Amino acid sequence: MEQTLAIIKPDAVERNLVGKILGRIEKAGLKIVALKMVQLSKGEAKGFYNVHREQPFFDSLTDFMSSGPIVVAVLQGERAIEHWRKIMGATDPAKADPDTLREAFGLSIEKNSVHGSDSPQSAAYEIPYFFSHLELVNP
Ligand code: CDP
Ligand code: MG
């Protein structure tokens, strides 16, 4: 069993897409083992996306990610990291496969509605960034 961090980004929360996206997660058979809504400060968004600090999109991305509430979740399942990224689709909604969340809901390469860890190493950084072990359940 693997765990991954999922985020419903501010553009999707703002458009009332939380239920639809959580429904898609459940329909896919991934287990939600932690869940909450938070709003990041700019500094907290920079810490979360630290690996991208040298990227040209870093300042705009961290402004966006701190611009409104987000829903963060830990998803569990077999190959959960890859499974969730497949459900999300490509980073750029214009290049995302049909029936992916980013294809359905993404507004732009930045405002692409959802986040998912990209490796066991990133999940190991991202999950404790938001959740203490006391906030994770074992279904
Ligand atoms: O989220 P994902 O792992 O698919 O992509 P990333 O390369 O790790 O980039 C993180 C986030 O930065 C993306 O999800 C976009 O919101 C944003 N981004 C952007 O604004 N412009 C880019 N050219 C690439 C990424
Ligand atoms: Mg990434």
Image (tube, grey):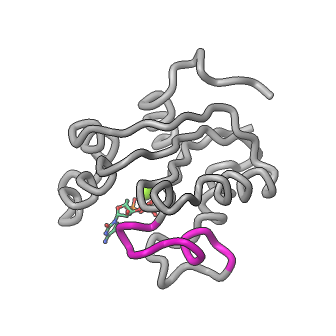
120 on left or right of 122? right
User: Residue 136, located in which quarter of the rendered image?
Assistant: top right
Pick whichever, 36 or 135, lies toward us.
36
Residue drawn 46% across the image and 70% down it? 91
In the image, residue 19 above or below residue 98: above
Q: Residue at x 37, y 39 (%)?
A: 39
30 relative to 21 in the view: left or right? right
- Picture coordinates of residue 60, whole percent (x, y): 22, 61
Q: Quadrant of the C terminus?
A: top right
The N terminus: image quadrant: top right
Coordinates of residue 118 in the picture (x, y in percent): 51, 53
Magenta residue span: 99-112
Residue name at image x 41 percent, y 45 percent = 69
Magenta region includes residue 89:
no
Residue at 25%, 43% in the rendered image: 46
Q: Is residue 36 left or right of residue 39?
A: right
x and y percentages locating residue 113 in the rendered image = 48, 62
Q: Is residue 58 above or below residue 74?
A: below
Q: Is residue 124 above or below residue 132?
A: below
Label tally: 0
Magenta stretch secondary structure, dominant? loop
The x and y percentages for residue 2 are 68, 40
- Give the residue at the far top of this rendering: 134
Ligand 1 shown in quarter? bottom left
Above/below status of 58 relative to 104: above
Query: For this rendering, which residue is in front, 55 or 27?
Result: 27
